[in-house]
Amino acid sequence: MNLLFSNDRLGEYPPSLYAATRDPLPPFPEQRGEERADVVVVGAGYTGLSAALHLAEAGREVAVLEAHRVGFGASGRNGGQLGSGQRLEVDELEAMAGREAARRLWDMAEEAKRLTRELAARAGVPVMDGIAHAFRKPAEFDHARALIDRLARDYGYGRIEALDRDAFRALVPSEAYVAGELDRGAGHLNPLNLAIGMARLADAAGARIRELSHVHHIRHGQKAGEKSIVQTGKGRVICDHVILAANGYLGHLDSHVAARVMPINNFIAATEPLGARAAEVLARPIGVHDTKFVVNYWRLDPEGRLIFGGGENVSYRFPADIAAKVRKPLLEIYPGLADVALTHAWGGTLAITMNRMPCFARPAPNCLSASGYSGHGLALATLAGKLMAQAVQGQAEGFDTMAALPSPAFPGGAALRWPLLVAGMGWYSLRDRLGF
């Protein structure tokens, strides 16, 4: 099954609120015939567009090949949360890589936020400050308070505030959570408009963006000076370097990455504007996510619509009624919204890894790949593109720091990862329902 075409119409954005209200962007041409470039970037999401922008601004000739439209994938469908840190908490990172490496990874994540905010500002995309983390159990709150102290003491980050039950419910009026925290250094934005804005910046810098240009095959150069050939449906691009930036839509283009990066689906719905009832959802215009394995996440947009993500499925096919799937966890948190209409509902494909850290790899001598952001990719994917652009130019320290992290293959590799994930998702969603 090719996830690029399994759930969506060719060249069309999904029926999301973002697509319905997006900034205008004229289509880019298809790739046809034979072209040449210094670098070919496969995928026009945050990773690919950031790589293309930084390379083009450095004077490299870049071709970006996108099977659908700019921001078609997870970059244009996600919850829009610009979170702090890596996908793992700093205590987990210290256990995995040691304190020095954990501090370096934290600093890189802070750089990712700064870079994303800078590009959003250049693209004219507003960023709203504040992300809350909602805890279901007292032990989660105890752990969070210890981490808040550690971040302030050892990492120089003092922007997270612990909120007890009453303080948190004053901010997030729901009885589903026992406490929470508020990260004032995190934020949220319109994700598709960020991708569109980055595409405009890359195009203005000289990158050649090609839409409706599905990459079918790549023949990598295997020794110094040997070119790579990237084959599309109607032509090919001959280049010196290839950057793989397709994330959950990589498909069969590289088996090494495919064994380590698992595509999964997630679902979001948006309500009608809530007006005065927005105060029943959030007391301030922040984003929120909780501690479920199948995480719930939400925020209000500038028009007062609730944008809520949640729900899992055990098929690569989207469910027939996405709105019903998302409404169930929404009403578990806000039962008073049962009468509110859902005007948009959509699904998308992201990618996870075994240890929830991104998979940075060199699949061939002249090829770089970054993917598997595990639901924490808005800022990190943007940074990943910059790190790969720097590596192409011979400055690989940042890329190598990420590539040095363990990136285990899923049991059974690419062939058996999906059946095993179905079993695992069933187990963890059961734990969520039972309150573990």
Image (cartoon, helix red, strand yellow):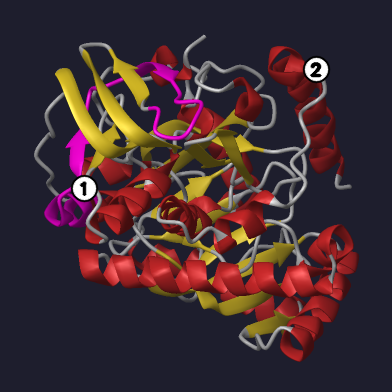
Left or right, 308 with respect to 312, comes to left
Q: Residue at x 44, y 39 (%)?
A: 74
Magenta segment: 199-226
Spatial CA distance of label 1 from label 2 is: 40 Å
Q: Secondary structure at mark 1?
A: loop
Q: Is residue 429 visible?
A: yes
Q: Which one is nearer the viewer's eye here, 423 or 203?
A: 203
Q: Which mark is drawn over residue 22?
A: 1
Label ID, residue 412: 2
The residue most toward the left is: 26
173 vs 311: above or below: below
Pick the front one: 73 or 214: 214
Q: Residue at x 16, y 24 (%)?
A: 30
Q: Where is residue 102 drawn, in percent x and y?
A: 75, 69
Category of crowding for the residue at label 2, using alpha-carbon neighbours closer than 10 angstroms: few (below 14), some (14–19), many (at least 20): few
User: On the image, which quarter does residue 290 sit in?
Assistant: bottom right
